[in-house]
Image (spheres, helix red, strand yellow):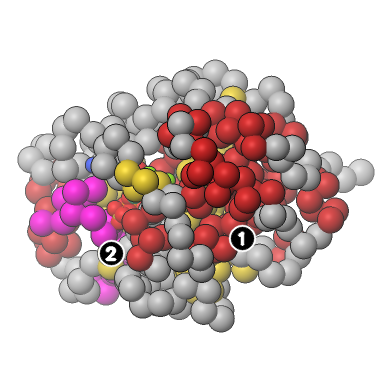
Amino acid sequence: MSTAAPYSRELQIAQLAVQRAAILTKRVFHDSAKGTVSKSDASPVTIGDFGAQALIISALKHNFPQDQIVAEEEAAALRSDGALSSQIWDLVKSTSLESSEAEGLLGGSVPDESAMLDLIDLGNSAGGRSGRVWTLDPIDGTKGFLRGGQYAVCLALLEDGDVKVGVIGCPNLPVDDSAPLTADIGSNATDATGRGVLFSAVKGEGATSRPLTVGDLADGKKISMKPITDLASASFCESVEAGHSNQSESAQIAQKLGITNPSVRMDSQAKYGSIARGAGDIYLRLPTSKSYQEKIWDHAGGDLIVREAGGEVTDTKGNRLDFGVGRTLASNSGVIAAPKAVHAKVLDVVQEVLGLK
Ligand SMILES: Nc1ncnc2c1ncn2[C@@H]1O[C@H](COP(=O)(O)OS(=O)(=O)O)[C@@H](OP(=O)(O)O)[C@H]1O
Ligand SMILES: [Mg+2]
Ligand SMILES: [Mg+2]
Ligand SMILES: [Mg+2]
């Protein structure tokens, strides 16, 4: 007698929900009016972020009504801006998967505009150490999205603070797992043929990649990090924004490790997916300020995908990322992701340069 793979239903719903949301974000990218507004921390949010959040939460509520949701966006700004809200509603009501069977699994369309706003606000849970919590970044790397660079639609399931399922849709990464890591800022690579990848992982079951929206969900191929023995040939990636990661410290670390390639700067959790499939080797995110706390939706899926592909992910103190303390990674500082075989060496140099040892 065969038993279903663990979390198979959660994985299937998460993959379909991310696919549908990614279709919405691509529609927004090709539309000149992105409805960009500036949030209180001066970061941008677009109708794509709001629309993708509404569609994914709708699918989660339909399938897992008891689960908590921690998502990046909230509807407050839309409740006081009817024009923006109706722009998003136009998108949400007209975006669906081609397969009616898949649409049925997601619970079909959102009933009306007011329900859409309420769905967006269901992402306001506090998170924490107990129970099932989905964490969602409808567009990770909004700045990358706006400039035609990398961005990702990110969804993960935590159970008692532990990541069990991670799904990351990257519309602008090459499908080919062996394509070299490139910074493609402003390269107009968006939607070019051969782009769009869906990374997935279930705890204990490994990590996969597959084309984002083409083919059967069962088509996922196992991915693993590149076995590296010689750090001199390693490639490392980091944020585009200097305010998100200390790039002068990372350059010193790379030099001390003997890495000769310059860093590849790309937005979003596409960095985690890229190293998990061996297109790159190391992801460094070094804190720029003591006060900024990383958000759980910026890391949960990527943390699992890299670890299931044979990597190690810690903060700069060497601790595993702790997703059970709320909406942020309040007890962590920075991120160091690398193949298991070299992680300790990388961490050692990080701590030396940061004066942590
Ligand atoms: N000060 C500071 N420090 C560190 N991180 C920050 C900071 N401010 C914002 N953010 C979060 O960074 C998310 C995108 O960062 P990335 O490194 O993936 O991309 S980027 O190259 O920096 O754009 C970005 O995600 P999105 O808002 O989903 O785009 C933010 O959640
Ligand atoms: Mg944001
Ligand atoms: Mg983000
Ligand atoms: Mg975001």
Q: Magenta residues, as a range?
A: 225-248
Select label 2 or label 1 by which is in front. 1
- What amino acid type should be assigned to the residue bearing mark 2? Arg
On whether residue 36 falls in the magenta region, the answer is no
337 relative position to 174: left or right: left
Whether residue 226 is visible, yes or no, is no
Q: Residue at x 23, y 55 (%)?
A: 241
| Disc 2: which residue | 265
Judged from the image, the secondary structure of the residue bearing numbered disc 2 is strand
Percent x, y for residue 152?
47, 56
Percent x, y for residue 25?
54, 58
Identify the residue at the far top of this view: 130
Ligand 4 contact, mark 1 (Cβ < 8 Å):
no
- What amino acid type should be assigned to the residue bearing mark 1? Ile
Q: Nearer the viewer, residue 336 or 312?
A: 336
Rendering quarter of residue 264 = bottom left
Whether residue 186 is visible, yes or no, is yes
Identify the residue at the far right of this view: 1
212 relative position to 109: left or right: left
| Disc 1: which residue | 23
Percent x, y for residue 331?
30, 26
Q: Nearer the viewer, residue 264 or 307?
A: 264
Q: Give the dominant element type of the magenta stretch: helix, strand or loop.
A: loop
Q: Give the answer, above or below, for where 38 lies relative to 120.
A: below
Q: Give the answer, above or below, for where 193 lies relative to 298.
A: below
Q: Residue at x 61, y 53 (%)?
A: 91
Percent x, y for residue 197?
56, 65
Q: How many C-alpha atoms fall within 10 Å of the one at disc 2: few (<14), some, or many (≥20)?
A: many
